[in-house]
Amino acid sequence: MKRYQRGFLLILGIFFLIGCKGNVSVDEAYNAIRPVKQLELPDQIEENFVVIIENVADEGTSYKNRVDLYINGHKINPDWLVSNVQNKYVYRMRMRPGYYELKAYYNAYVGWGEDKYEILSEELIRIQHDKRTVVTADIVKKPNGEPVNKKMYFTAKFEDFTKETKKRQDSEPVEIDSFIDLQINTVPEHAQIIIDDKVVGQSPLRYKVTRNEDHIIQISAPGYRTKTKFIDHAKMGSQNIYHVIQELEKE
């Protein structure tokens, strides 16, 4: 009889141990305990991810240059018709909150063929449901369209969603800043730059000028012929940066 009692108590003990999954401390709770049902964030309504790549193609030596964007290995097709002189690529997307791998390729016609240059992110891109992640890259190029840096990097920032911003985007035209940045790169570097008869520094440099006026740039360096460039304000468009790339001729 005692033998049966001991067996019965043993069985009860086993069921008790199975029912109790073990004690967990406060610090261990996060990793040890899983929810019965996983909660999900609400559907993403706002465009919470924007990728902007500038200075891609133009009517000069960068004609037909283009960009390919990849997220987690998936190529992202633009939602607009890309032209052969598309200078600025803007991808606006709704993404599930989380971390993503972001990569782009700048395809440039240099010499006899097309070369490919990477634009990378130094870390995974974080995308949230309550903020907009804006990732940007500005391609700085040599006069032949080849990038100055063989490997380029994105920069990321976060913006708040606001009703005022959304209302302005939906019902009002976008206000264009009355000033624009001139990004001036030269070969050789450290050339003296004069804009509208004012010495502004040495290349490479970025200088702010009025958008609705024409400008004259003088570029000079010892041992090279001085170059004067006329900047037609009509070609500036609505872009934030206007790139000027000039290779000087030796005397």
Image: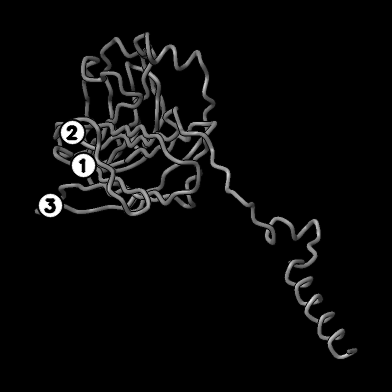
What SS does tag 1 mark? Answer: strand
Label whose residue precedes the other's in the sequence (3 or 2): 2
For label 2, the residue is: 82
Quadrant holding the N terminus: bottom right
Is there a contact, CB below 8 Å, between mark 1 and mark 2? yes
Q: Residue 198 lies in what quarter of the image?
A: top left
Badge nearest the viewer, 1 or 3 = 1
C-alpha separation, residue under disc 1 versus residue under disc 3: 16 Å
Q: How many marks?
A: 3
Using the image as rendered, state which of residue 233 and residue 135 is in the foreground.
135
For label 3, the residue is: 111
Q: Position of residue 145 (x, y in %)?
A: 21, 43
The three-letter amino acid code for the residue at tag 3 is Gly
- Above or below, 224 relative to 217: below
Q: Position of residue 155 (x, y in %)?
A: 46, 41
The disc at residue 66 is 1
